[in-house]
Amino acid sequence: MTREATTTYFNYSQIAGDNLQATDLDPFNNLELSDEQREEMNSEARNLIIATADKYLAPYGAEMVGNGDVYGPMQHASEIDREELKEVLGLIDFDHIIEKYI
């Protein structure tokens, strides 16, 4: 997708209330992970969030990029329901990722 023909709709933080890069599945380090393991686990979580968002956004010709920005054709900007996307992302089950590190 070329950025010239697109616009930024919104950022992940505008729908989820948090920065995508700050995703942390174990904020209190209860899993006692090394820094490398923690980053690997959280990277998997971010990738899952982006993949899930992209499935929702694809019919609009939009995509979420690594920093959480959502880009797509300007004519579809008003069609994307941020609350619905927030609900979709809220249903993500991260258990299969966490189980790898237990």
Image (cartoon, rainbow, N blue to C red):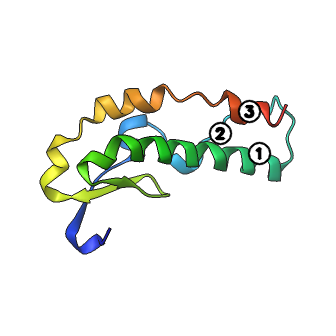
- Nearer-N-terminus badge (2/1): 2
Q: Residue at x 32, y 49 (%)?
A: 58
Amino acid at dot 1 = Arg
Considering the numbered disc 3 on the image, is that residue within a helix, a strand or a loop?
A: helix
Q: Which residue is mark 2?
A: 24
Pointers 2 and 1 in contact (CB under 8 A)? yes
Residue 101 shown left or right of residue 86 in the figure:
right
- Residue 77, numbered label: none
Q: Residue at x 65, y 46 (%)?
A: 44
Q: Which residue is mark 1?
A: 38
Q: CA distance from mark 3 to mark 2?
A: 11 Å
Residue 56 shown left or right of residue 49 in the figure:
left
Q: Residues within 10 Å of mark 3 (few under 14, many from 20)?
A: some
Q: Nearer the viewer, residue 73 or 59?
A: 59
Q: CA distance from mark 3 to mark 1?
A: 10 Å
Q: Which residue is mark 3?
A: 98
**47 relative to 83, above or below:** below
Q: Residue at x 43, y 36 (%)?
A: 17
Amino acid at dot 2 = Asp
Q: CA distance from mark 2 to mark 1?
A: 8 Å
